[in-house]
Amino acid sequence: MIIDPSDLSAEKNYRLLTGIVVPRPIAWVSSLNDSGGVNLAPFSTFTFVSPKPPMLGFSVGRKGSEYKDTSRNILTREAYVVHIADRNLLQPLHDSAEEVEAHISEADMLRLETAQSDLIDVPRIAAAPVAMECRLRQVLEFGETRSRFIVGEILRIHLRDGLMTDGKIDTLELDPICRLGGPNYATLGEVTTLRTLKQTPKNAGA
């Protein structure tokens, strides 16, 4: 089969790409709406873009002509929290993607306890194993749909006790959720560790 993406609508290309680019990590983002409520939504076009200073980027699309609440909230307040959810938070993470009125707090709706952040006024989700306080640094728009790629600097990282050993995150202990195509999710299956082969010096045996 050969597909010409130019023959497809934005929606059909989205469905195709989200089934091809898998699995994807999920940024579970909290922001503050105009009334001060905690907006919460998942985004699976997500990665880190810089280690120093540490920066994260995720893409926010539009519904019709309107950007999602998260985008508007971040551009207004320039602060937000990116969480990594684990298996126990799968249902509320999925439910937080439901479209509701902008003034409604998904955190309240889903009865998720929040905790005060250290450096920004946006609360974090207390049950999340990882929460990263972020300050907006850059917004880039792409394509005909003008999807916004939001880049923020990580100001503070909150980790659940026991997740880090010798400066590294224990991924199995984190048990992160990843996104597949459609309403499908996955958790970690078999994890394979490969060691780098030692290179033989070019002048060895000369």
Image (tube, rainbow, N blue to C red):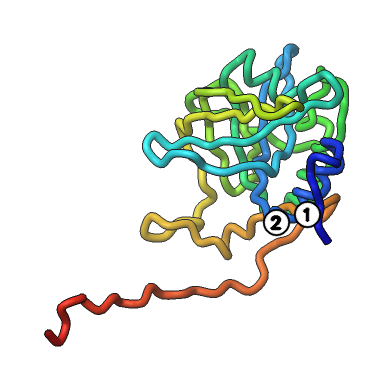
Residue at the outermost bottom position: 205
Q: In screen coordinates, is 188 left or right of 156? A: right
Reading the image, the residue beneath label 2 is 22
Q: Does 81 appear above or below 198? A: above
What residue is rendered at 86% in x and 37% in y? 9
Of 170 and 116, nearer the camera is 170
Of 50 and 92, nearer the camera is 50
Q: Position of residue 33 (x, y in %)?
A: 72, 18
* Labelled pair 2, 1 in contact (Cβ < 8 Å): yes
Q: Secondary structure at mark 2?
A: loop
Q: Does 157 appear above or below 105? A: below
Q: Does 168 appear above or below 13? A: below
Q: Position of residue 12 (x, y in %)?
A: 86, 43
What residue is rendered at 44% in x and 39% in y? 50
Q: In screen coordinates, is 40 left or right of 3? A: left
Q: Is residue 92 visible?
A: no
Q: Amino acid at mark 2?
A: Val
Near mark 2 (Cα within 10 A), the count class, few <14, some 14-19 or many ≥20, is some
Counting the numbered discs, the total is 2
Q: Quadrant of residue 99?
A: top right
Q: In screen coordinates, is 156 left or right of 124? A: left
Near mark 1 (Cα within 10 A), the count class, few <14, some 14-19 or many ≥20, is some
Q: Is residue 152 visible?
A: yes
Q: Marks 2/1: CA distance?
A: 6 Å
Q: Secondary structure at mark 1?
A: helix
Q: Does 114 appear above or below 164? A: above
Reading the image, the residue beneath label 1 is 19
Q: Amino acid at mark 1?
A: Gly
Assign the N terminus to one quadrant of the image.
bottom right
What residue is rendered at 83% in x and 19% in y? 65
Q: Position of residue 124 (x, y in %)?
A: 62, 33
